[in-house]
């Protein structure tokens, strides 16, 4: 059976082309019926089998509904479309998609009679060969193979088949719209993408794909269609749509207008690709990139990356700060311009680290003493490493540099090295001072004995007085050596700070271009202080003043008495204090450095150690005082507060022992010292003063002798114990054992290490007095006399 549908116009029933087709069909004994689309609903009951459907129309658009209806009535029908002026419409509509039509024939008026005759012959042959059992697909295949077609028709048929296969199998969504934007074609890719089948979409507009509430700033599909309708031939956009279950689908769409050869709009072709995974991946990459940037911004090292040409591609914030280049300015710049490295001392340019990495293809580290020259010319010491950057395939794609500012670290390391060297020198100085004190003790003990035997009017007396003055200078020098060597708790004495600071200043400023101006009141209060340690602290401040005035100047040194109220000078308590000040005419101390001048290792001098003012601060703190920076109209002014011992003035002359004859005495004295000259001179001095003396060289001998004499009932009235005994029992252990024998033993500790903690806290170790070496006859006699009086008072 065959069905002939002429859908061109009701009044054109005698059309020549239609009549020729009827004639051809009659020759094949095929029954044709002339019907219109309005009566097509009645076809299902009149056709007993799938017919051969021939559609005749002037254009494709009016046949959309007719073709779909025929296919729905007879799924196995072979549909042939005849149309004058037919053009290739595969990408414009769905006439040949999914087998809706079997063949397209271009039949122009000039050759319509010949083509109709040929068509009739081949239709008849196909029917006879396949009879009623022949399938529509076989008939279609036979017709394609048997009907002699013009070259353009054959190419058209082949193109239709190729394009139909593409449309059917394309993974992307392909949708054809008519001129009003209604869906005519919905391929399998669109169905897989959104979950809507063809029946649910054909004949609808695109708005059912829009997400409820919109998708932010993402354009809608209808807005893209509106742009094309407004005259844009092709539009490409990313839109967010919703599938059948309400899930968001990110889609990259291309929408193009379809027109005929006359420029008339026939419809639209919509191509859609699911870019949800791509967008998620891009979002993941963006998030990873942001995490990387946050990490790079957060780490304390500078990071620079370059490409293989050595041009900067990234700087983190630390690198921006160290190099002085903002990222926006540095991008694309040669690394050698942004990252200028030179030798710290010679300023010779270092090799570009990127070149080293590219040349060696390995991780490299910068050589020692490398400095980075920033954009503003400032210089920093850096430690740096460079490494190649490789992609997933192992190809070198750039270089990463990681570097840090080690200026402060290097300064601290240098300071620590100097401190270690100073410590080593300190140990040496301490040993020298100890041995020197022993020598001074023997030397000036003998000078003191000579002075005792020389008449007051003898010319030798003046020479001995000069030697005596030199002794005190030498003793002060060894005291400074010991302070430099050990520090420790101060061995305080009550005295005049004026005498100490005047002597220290005159000694330091001798031979320099600097002069000193002293402004002390006559009634300056006395204080308790360790002369050696306090002299060292004052020396450090004075030396600092001398160094900041290389061309010379005046250092003003003065003092005053002051009673502080509570919290007037934190952290000092209220009470009487002696205030000293040292003021220079140098450049002064910047406000930014005032909080740091007393920090260990802080220095603004090229060759400074940063220990001088820190040592002064430590000494003053150990004396219960305070040191700070005062206001000055010219240079720097340091102020020192020390607790006053009493509110009576002490003259400088009070600091020296009286030059009269030493006090005599009587009693039994034992001396323990490892140095034989010291033992001998002490025995001679004490013997001359009237004491009975017995000598031992070490702690074991002293403990044995004391035990023996105590058992005999001859307890010594005083025992002078040397604190340090190389290779033997020292004075601390000997004292402990003697006190175990006799808890009332009268022990005096003596040492050339006068800064030893035992010397300042002697009572904690069982001693009743202290004698610091070197000492002369008057000091030794005075200390013994005090102990003897205490012993006799107790008995």
Image (cartoon, grey):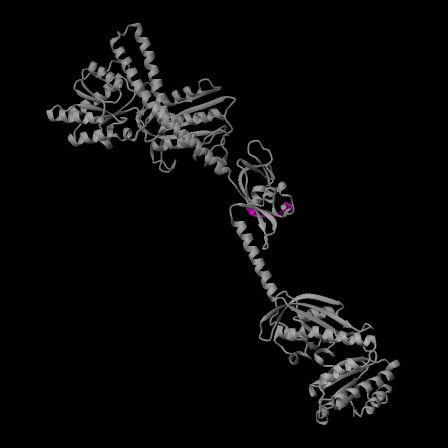
Is the C terminus in the top left, top right, bottom left or bottom right quadrant? top left
Q: Residue furthest right?
A: 110
Whole-percent x and y of residue 152?
A: 82, 75
Please state, as top left, top right, bottom left or bottom right, where the N terminus lies in the image.
Answer: bottom right
* Residue drawn at point x = 59 percent, y = 39 percent: 374
Q: Is residue 287 left or right of residue 686?
A: right
Quarter of the figure with residue 286: bottom right
Indicate whether 189 appears above or below 333.
below
Quick check: 249 above or below 638? below
Q: Position of residue 605 (x, y in %)?
A: 50, 30
Asked if one can make out residue 522 in the rendered structure from this viewpoint, the answer is no
Task: Inspect this view and state whether residue 97 appears.
Answer: yes
The reply, left or right, for residue 498 in relation to residue 25 is left
Residue visible at 44% across and 18% down in the picture: 510
Q: Nearer the viewer, residue 507 or 714?
A: 714
Q: Which residues are magenta?
A: 309-317
Q: In the rendered structure, does residue 177 fall within the stretch colored magenta?
A: no
Residue at (79, 82) in percent of width and height = 146
Q: In the rendering, at what x and y percent does residue 188 appear?
A: 65, 75
How many discs mark residues in the rendered view?
0
């Amino acid at each position: 059976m065959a069905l002939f549908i002429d859908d061109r116009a009701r009044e054109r029933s005698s059309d020549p082309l239609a009549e020729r087709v009827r004639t051809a069909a009659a020759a094949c004994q095929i029954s044709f019926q002339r019907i219109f689309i309005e009566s097509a609903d009645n076809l299902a009951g009149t056709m007993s089998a799938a017919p051969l459907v021939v559609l005749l129309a002037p254009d494709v658009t009016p046949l959309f509904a007719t073709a779909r209806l025929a296919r729905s009535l007879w799924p196995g029908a072979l549909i042939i479309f005849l149309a004058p002026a037919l053009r290739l419409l595969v990408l414009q509509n769905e006439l040949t998609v999914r087998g809706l039509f079997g063949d397209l024939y271009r039949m122009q008026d000039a050759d319509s009679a010949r083509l109709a005759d040929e068509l009739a012959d081949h239709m008849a042959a196909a029917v006879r060969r396949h009879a009623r059992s022949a399938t529509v697909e076989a008939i279609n295949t036979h017709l394609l193979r048997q009907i002699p077609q013009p070259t353009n028709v054959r190419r058209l048929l082949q193109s239709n088949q190729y394009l139909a296969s593409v449309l059917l199998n394309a993974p992307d969504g392909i949708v054809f719209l008519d001129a009003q934007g209604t869906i005519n074609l919905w391929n399998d890719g669109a169905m897989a993408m959104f979950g809507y089948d063809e029946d649910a979409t054909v004949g609808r507009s695109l708005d059912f794909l829009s997400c409820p509430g919109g998708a932010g700033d993402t354009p809608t599909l209808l807005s893209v269609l509106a742009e094309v309708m407004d005259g844009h031939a092709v539009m490409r956009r990313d839109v967010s749509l919703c599938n059948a279950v309400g899930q968001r689908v990110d889609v990259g769409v291309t929408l193009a207008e379809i027109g005929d050869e006359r420029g008339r709009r026939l419809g639209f072709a919509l191509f859609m690709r699911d870019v949800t995974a791509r967008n998620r991946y891009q979002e993941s990459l963006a998030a990873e990139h942001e995490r990387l940037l946050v990490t790079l911004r957060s780490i304390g090292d500078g990071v620079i990356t370059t490409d293989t040409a050595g041009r900067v591609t990234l700087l983190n914030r630390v690198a921006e700060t160290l190099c002085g280049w903002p990222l926006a300015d540095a991008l694309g710049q040669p690394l050698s311009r942004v990252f200028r490295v030179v030798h710290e001392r010679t300023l010779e340019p270092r090799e570009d680290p990127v070149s080293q990495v590219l040349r060696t293809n390995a991780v490299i580290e910068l050589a020692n003493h490398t400095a980075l020259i920033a954009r503003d010319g400032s210089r920093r010491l850096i430690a740096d490493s460079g490494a190649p950057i490789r992609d997933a395939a192992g190809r070198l794609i750039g270089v990463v540099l990681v570097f840090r500012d080690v200026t402060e670290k290097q300064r601290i390391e240098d300071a620590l090295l100097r401190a270690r060297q100073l410590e080593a020198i300190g140990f040496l100085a301490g040993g020298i001072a100890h041995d020197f004190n022993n020598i001074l003790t023997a030397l000036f003990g003998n000078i003191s004995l000579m002075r005792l035997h020389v008449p007051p009017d003898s010319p030798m007396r003046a020479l001995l007085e000069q030697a005596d003055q030199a002794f005190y200078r030498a003793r002060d020098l060894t005291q400074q050596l010991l302070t430099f060597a050990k520090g420790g708790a101060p061995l305080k004495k009550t005295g005049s700070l004026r005498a100490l600071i005047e002597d220290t200043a005159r000694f330091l400023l001798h031979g320099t271009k600097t002069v000193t101006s002293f402004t002390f009141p006559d009634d300056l209060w006395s204080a308790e202080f360790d002369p050696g340690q306090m002299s060292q602290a004052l020396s450090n401040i004075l030396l600092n003043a001398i160094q900041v005035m290389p061309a010379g100047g005046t250092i003003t040194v003065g003092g005053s008495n002051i009673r502080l109220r509570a919290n007037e000078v934190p952290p000092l308590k209220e009470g009487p204090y002696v205030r000293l000040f040292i003021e220079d005419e140098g450049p002064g101390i910047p406000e930014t450095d005032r909080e740091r001048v007393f920090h260990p290792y802080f220095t603004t001098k090229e060759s400074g150690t940063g220990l001088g003012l820190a040592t002064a601060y430590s000494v003053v703190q150990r004396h219960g005082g305070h040191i700070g920076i005062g206001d000055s109209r010219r240079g720097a002014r340091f102020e020192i507060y020390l607790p006053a011992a009493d509110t009576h003035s002490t003259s400088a002359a009070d600091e020296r022992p009286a030059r009269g004859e030493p006090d005599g005495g009587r009693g039994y004295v034992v001396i323990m010292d490892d140095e034989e000259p010291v033992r001998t001179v002490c025995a001679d001095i004490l013997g001359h003063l009237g004491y009975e003396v017995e000598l031992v060289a070490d702690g074991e001998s002293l403990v044995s002798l004391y035990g023996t004499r105590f058992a005999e009932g001859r307890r010594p009235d005083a025992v002078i114990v040397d604190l340090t005994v190389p290779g033997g029992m020292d004075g601390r252990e000997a004292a402990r054992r003697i006190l175990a024998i006799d808890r009332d033993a009268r022990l005096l500790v003596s040492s050339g290490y006068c800064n030893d903690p035992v010397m300042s806290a002697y009572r904690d170790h069982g001693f009743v007095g202290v004698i610091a070496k070197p000492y002369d006859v008057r000091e030794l006699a005075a200390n013994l006399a005090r102990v003897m009086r205490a012993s006799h008072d107790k008995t």
